[in-house]
Amino acid sequence: MTTISQLVAEASAEIEAVNASKTGGMGTWFLREMWYFAAASADVKHGKILNKQMLGEPILIGRDANGKVFAMKDICPHQAVPLSSGHFDGKEISCCFHGWTFNTSGVCTGIPSLVDDQEFPVCKIKTKSYVCREVRDTIWIYFGDKTEDLPDVPEAPGLGEMYCYQTTVRLLLPIHIDYAALALIDPAHVPYIHKSWWWRSARNLKVKNKRYVPEGSGWTMVKHHPSPHSIFQFANDKIETEISFRLPGCRREYLTFGGRTIISGISTLTPIDETTTELNHTTYWTVPGTSFITPFVHYFVNEFLGQDRDVALLQEKGLKHKPKLIPTIKDAGTPGAWYLLCKKEWADAHRDGRAFENPIPDTILRWRS
C-alpha cells in the first residue's frame, strides 16, 4: 500500500520537474475532458451573449430566444473578428465585419456578399462549438474531444430536489490554476488569512483529525461536526459538514442541521490563461422565506474570498521570480500533493486511453489550525 510519505515524495518529484522546466510556475497545461465553470445563469440573459477567455481560448457564451445556453469559439473563421462583437437576434449571430451569420452550433448560415447564382458550401464553414450545460443556475462548458458519455457536471452537494436561494461571487486571481487549487484545499492558511470578527483567528489553533476517502476525481473529508470554536458553536452538536474536492478545481461543502441541508456551496477554478484564474463561489441556502438575505450572503462571501485574492496578489510578486517552493509539508500540505497526483493521473489516463484510477488512500490527516 502506498504511504503518505511516498505520495508526498512523488508529488515533490513532480514539483521538482516543474521547477526545473523552462516554463516555470506550475506548468502551462490544463486538464482536458472536463467541465469548467463558465458563468452564473443570471449573467446570460435571454437573447444575449457574452465573451470570455477560458483555458486560453476565446469563448462566446449565449442564451437563445428559447432560453437554451450554447457556447462556441469567439472567432469568425473568415477574418478572425470576435463574433461577440456582432449582432445576436436570439437565433443567429452576424459578424460585424462582413455580416456572415452563424447559428448557435457554430455553423455558417449565410454570406451576404454572395449573389444568387454563386454556389458555395456555406454550411461547411464552422467555428468550433462546445458542449454546454446549465445546472442549478450555473453554466458549465466541457473542454475535450468527447461528445457522448460525458461525466456529470459538478454541482453543490446535499441539495437533492430542495428549493433553495443562491448567489455567486466572482473574483480574479493573478496566479496559475495550480497555485489557486493548492490554496483552495489548504487547511493551514485559514486562521491567518481570514481575519474577520466572525471567523476564528490564529490565537485559537486546535489539532484537527479528519478522515479523507477517495471519491470521483478527488477526495472527500467525511461528514463531521464543525470545530467547537467556529461560528456554528451555538449548535455544534446538531450541525455536521462534509467537504470534498474534485478535479479540475472544485471545492464543495455543505452543512446540515438535524440531518437537513441548510447551506451548500461550490467553489470553482477556471483558468483564463497561464497566469490568471477565475474563482467563482456559488452559495445555496434552503431556509424558506430568506431571499432577503441574499445581499448579506454575497457581502460576507465576497469579504471572505477577497482575503484569498489579496494574498494571491502578494503571491504573484514572489512567483515572478520563479522560486523553488516546498508546498507539501505534511499533513496540512498533503491535499496539495494529492491534487498534483490526481492531475497527473488524469492526464496520463487520458493520454493512454484508459480509465482514471484514483491515487488517494483512505487516510486520517492531522494538523493545527
Image (cartoon, rainbow, N blue to C red):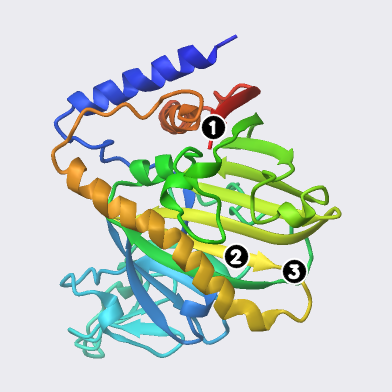
Would residue 158 be found to the left or right of residue 50 on screen?
Answer: right
Quarter-of-image position of residue 82? bottom left
Q: For the residues carrying marks 2 and 1, which lies nearer the camera in this image?
A: 1
Dot 1: what SS? strand
**Contact between labelled residues 3 and 2, with CB atoms less than 8 Å apart:** no
Task: Say what amino acid the circle numbered 2 marks.
Answer: Thr
Name the spot of residue 251 as percent of width and height, x first.
54, 48
Q: Earlier in the sequence, mark 2 or mark 1?
A: 2
| Mark 2 surroundings: few (<14), some (14-19) or many (≥20) residues within 10 A | many
Outermost residue, right side: 258
Q: Earlier in the sequence, mark 1 or mark 3?
A: 3
Give the label on residue 188, or none: none
Task: Say what amino acid the circle numbered 3 marks.
Answer: Thr
Name the spot of residue 247 as percent of width and height, x first.
50, 42
Separation of residues labelled 1 and 3 (CA atoms): 32 Å
Name the spot of residue 337 as percent of width and height, x first.
44, 27
Task: Say what amino acid the circle numbered 1 marks.
Answer: Arg
Compare residues 76 and 23 and report the one nearer the observer.
23
Compare residues 2 and 28 and report the one nearer the observer.
2
Residue underneath mark 1: 368
Residue name at image x 26 percent, y 90 percent: 116
Residue underneath mark 2: 283
| Mark 3 surroundings: few (<14), some (14-19) or many (≥20) residues within 10 A | some
Quarter-of-image position of residue 137? bottom right
**Contact between labelled residues 3 and 1, with CB atoms less than 8 Å apart:** no
Give the label on residue 286, or none: 3
Outermost residue, front side: 203
Residue name at image x 22 percent, y 83 percent: 118
Q: Which quarter shows the N terminus?
A: top right
